[in-house]
Amino acid sequence: MTGHSERVVVVGNGMAGARVAAELHARGEDLKVTVLGAEPHPAYNRIMLSTLLTGKIDESDVELAEVAGRGVDLRTGVTVSAIDRATGQVRTDDGDRIPYDHLVLATGSRAVVPALPGLDPEQLPARVIPFRTLDDCRRILALAGTARRALVLGGGLLGLEAARGLALRGLDVGVVHRVPYLMDRQLDPAAGAMLAGTLAGLGVTTHVAVEPTAVRADAAGVRLELSDGRSLDADLLVLACGVRPDTALAAAAGLAVERGVLVDDRLRTSDRRISAIGDCAQHDGTLTGLVAPAWAQARVVAQLVTGQDPQARYRPRPVVTRLKAAGIDLAAMGDPTGGPGEELTFADPARGTYARLRIHDERLAAAILLGDNPSVGTVIQLFDRGHPVPTDRRALLLGRAVGGAVAAPAASPALMPDAATVCQCNTVSKGALVRCWRDGARTVDAVVAATRAGTGCGSCRDAVAGIVDWLSRTDPVEVGR
């Protein structure tokens, strides 16, 4: 990336592709950016599909605000069939050849369809639907309108969000998970068991430590056969069995591929004229699969391609997972499987509350907070910024007010430090929101449009609204630091 690229082609119009196009457009007035998206829709927020499933929002609410402007040629419903690295062109399924000076792969990932009798990945039964795309969501909603019972295969983050969404629509929902406890990538067994209890109270039954063995589906319904001899019947089966990076195009072009397309700190592939970002990219042995890293990668690529910052490098930030499901408060961060350091745990099954902290070298190495815990904001800030934890460990664990490097959540945002990160997805601080307000943004929508806070997973939207409301009642000149 020399900073002199004039023709940039982006393959993929998902959350990563749309963001890198917007970042390029904002920085490179002389660039000609072409975005090729296989899906026929404008770019949309995939993370918000689970909220769409609940009926609380409609499709217009999941559309991304990244608008193609002058110098951006957006083509939807176009599939790239090959990359010709020798001539610097991509070929599309309609026979077009599009030249590039720099190519950005944002091909994302595909839903995993488990190898089970009765499931053909190329032609799934009508009542068996992966939960990955807007079209998938539309099909689920169409069936859910007349369904009474639904099954979700997969007890990870996405599966539980889908299950809760369907339960809110009045369906009897069951979740089948191979592992002995839910969300095994983020939680420990105790938290997983507590979460199952919370879900049971919300109308979602869980079946853990059991393997699916076959699927029988016809026009009347779906039957899922299990390894313990049981069978579960439903009107709809949702597949939430994980995703696999879509690397076929890169591999066919001869780029270095392992689980994902290999990239360096500049997000360059084995071909210096080609970058990869988002779900399809593998950086330092790691796949992301989350929006915050993808958007950070998009910013780095734009800085390098336009020459705005030739020293820009991608540096992964600590990942915080939030479960977006009504009636469930869950935050998980770090490796739940253990490691060096002191462990603190508190469980209150009657209230559905669980907290576990792992502290190493006076820093928070991992945490799980399930249920109502007033210290969740403080814990996230400590983990995200790597600040020392307060002396009173119990304050973090039990949610009492704490002192130290990060202020505890309080009734007034005035007590939040300006450095506190409000939006994890876009790394927007409270100070940035205050500055935006002072620059003239006077509504939540205006602040969101200017800072992008709340446009990722959406979990911080209430916090952004709270800060805007506080600012509207406070003389901006006297806003406290």
Image: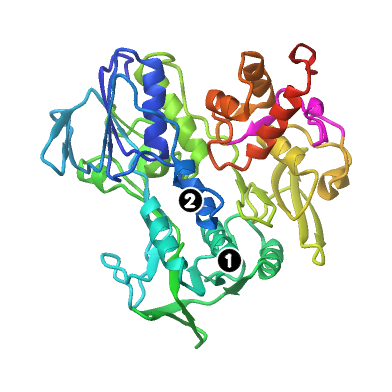
Q: Residue at x 80, y 13 (%)?
A: 478
Q: Picture coordinates of residue 473 (x, y %)?
A: 77, 23
Instruction: Kindly identify which residue carries mark 2.
Output: 49
Identify the coloring. rainbow
- Indicate which disc residue 23 carries: none
Q: Picture coordinates of residue 56 (x, y %)?
A: 56, 51
Q: CA distance from mark 1 to mark 2?
A: 15 Å
- Kindly state the secondary structure of the residue where label 2 is placed: helix
Majority secondary structure in the magenta region: loop
Report whether 300 appears left or right of 392.
left
Report whether 188 appears left or right of 262.
right
Q: Picture coordinates of residue 363 (x, y %)?
A: 74, 38
The amino acid on which the numbered mark 1 sits, given as a three-letter code, is: Ala
Q: Quadrant of the C terminus?
A: top right
Instruction: Kindly identify which residue carries mark 1.
Output: 167
Q: Which residues are magenta?
A: 403-424
- 368 relative to 164, above or below: above
**Residue 149 or residue 472, whichever sits in front:** 472
Q: Quadrant of the N terminus?
A: top left
Q: Residue at x 59, y 62 (%)?
A: 168
Q: Residue lying farthest left?
A: 95
Query: Which quarter of the picture shows residue 114?
Result: bottom left
The amino acid on which the numbered mark 2 sits, given as a three-letter code, is: Leu
Q: Residue at x 65, y 17 (%)?
A: 435
